[in-house]
Every structure is written in structure tokens, then in C-alpha cells.
Image (cartoon, rainbow, N blue to C red):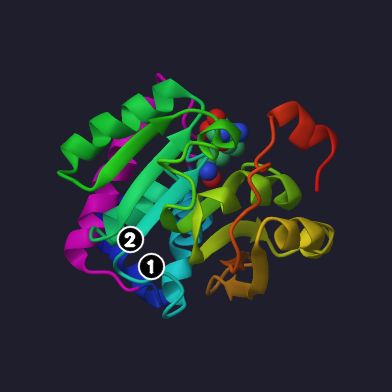
Amino acid sequence: MESKEIYQRLTQCGIPATQELAQGLATYHRLLMDWNTRMDLTAVTEEAEMLDRHYVDALSPLARPGLLPQTGTLIDVGTGAGFPGMVLKILVPSLEVTLLDSLQKRLAWLEELSVDLGLSGLTFLHGRAEEEGQDPALRERFDFAAARAVADLRLLCELCLPFVKVGGRFLAMKSVDSEGELDAARPAIQTLGGELAGTYDYAIPHTQVTHRVIVVEKVRPTPPAYPRRWTKLQKSPL
Ligand code: SAM
């Protein structure tokens, strides 16, 4: 995928970019496709689909002014091959980004990639969110948490909100048919110290694709009992 094509698509979608930053995404894409032949990084490989369903999707918070500022700390919970954390970092290099995943090999790949891309201000954290969220060095330390395609929103809130500082924000990237999931998650948001600030739907021009960002503000500290162990969290969601 050419950087010019990425640049044009991002600007067409209202995502602030420069040709130079789009070049970083083109490099990321080339390495992702290369490594995908040896490692299970992504199921989608068709270029137009990658561009709209992965890159634009992961970057869509940037299309809404003020939702994700240029500075601050962000943790991407369950980053996989770097969505959304790594692609956000490529486009907003001044963000301090922590990429968390329970799979070490994906993180090792992302770390190698960050060297190729010359990125600094990235931390690679191997672990489970429900355990790391109890670590005082990580708990309530981030301005933002983001997650995409990791778990149902009730569980996801318990995995992500403990990382967010009071006054910070959790961005859940969900599909537009997540209304039921959102309704079911309202008690969890409240219990974990969050407040639903709104949902932001984002239609990709000239496609049938619409993305949704669910925005949860952290208004109170998360009670110390959360996050619980995975079995408990899954068996009795809040
Ligand atoms: N966010 C990426 C994306 O949108 O392409 C990856 C999605 S993939 C379906 C889910 C990822 O979350 C996997 O890489 C998995 O290892 C990770 N994951 C799932 N549960 C987790 C947990 N409790 N703690 C940390 N990582 C987790």
C-alpha cells in the first residue's frame, strides 16, 4: 500500500495526517503483511479492507477534535498486532503509548517494529489486563485507555477503567450495533467509577462501513476490588 493512498484516505475521512506520518503507516503495513506469512497477526489482508476496517477504524478517534489530544498517556488493552495503540502512536508520535497483551510474541514483533519505525515513547507490557490493573505502578496512571475487539463491554470496562486516572477517558471501539452491549454495561461503568460521555458514530465515506467509539469518562477512583480474576470477572460480569 502506497503512503500517498493512505494519506489521501485518511484526510478524506477527516483524520489529521501528513505525508510523512502516512509513510510510517505504509512501513507498518509492509512489515505487517511480511510477518503475517510467518505469524498469525491479521486475518484481513486485502488492501482496501485493511485501510478502512483497520487503519481508519483504529484512527477514527482522531477524526473527532478533542477526543484524543496530541499529548498524554494511553494504554491499549489487548493490542494484538497494534490496533489501535501502535497505529495511533504512528500518527500521533507525541502520545506516550503502552501496548498491553497477554501474547508475548505479538509484543516482541511490535517492539522490533518500533525500532524500524524509529519510534520512542512506547512501552510493551506482557501480561493480563485483570492482573496488571491491580499493579499500583499502572493503576489509575493513564490519561486514556483504548481497546478494540477484545471482550464484551461489561468485561472490557473492568479490564480497562482501573488503568485510567480520574479525569481521564476510556475509548471502546465497537460496532454500531453495540446498543444492547452498551445498555448491559451501564451498571459496570457506574461501579468502576466511570460515566458514559457518549457514543461517536463515524461513517466511512463511499462505503457501507460505520465505526463507533464509546466514550467513558473516569469520574471516581475504581474500588480496590476491581479488576477481579478472569474466571470471576467472566462468570459474574458487573
Ligand atoms: N486490538 C486488536 C485488534 O483490534 O486487532 C487485537 C484484537 S484480538 C481479537 C484480542 C487481543 O486481546 C489478543 O491479542 C489477545 O491476546 C488479547 N487479550 C485478550 N484478553 C486479554 C487480557 N485479559 N489481557 C491482555 N490481553 C488480552
- Residue ID at (71%, 45%): 155
Q: In this view, does 238 lie to the left or right of 90?
A: right
Question: Which segment is the magenta one?
Answer: 16-45
Q: Residue 27: within the magenta?
A: yes
* Label 1: how many Cα within 10 Å (few below 14, some 14–19, many 20+): many
Residue occupied by mark 1: 9
Q: Is residue 18 left or right of residue 179?
A: left
- Residue 192, compared with residue 42, is above or below; it is below
Dominant SS in magenta: helix
Residue 1 versus residue 142: which sits nearer the camera? 142
- Residue 176, compared with residue 77, is above or below; it is below
Quarter assignment of residue 183: bottom right
Residue occupied by mark 2: 6
Q: Residue 153 carries which label?
A: none
Quarter assignment of residue 133: top right
Image spot of residue 73 (x, y percent): 35, 57
Q: Can residue 43 be seen in this view?
A: no
Q: Three-letter amino acid code at disc 1?
A: Arg
Residue 140 versus residue 79: which sits nearer the camera? 140
- Residue ID at (48%, 33%): 101
Q: Which residue lies furthest to the front in this view?
A: 224
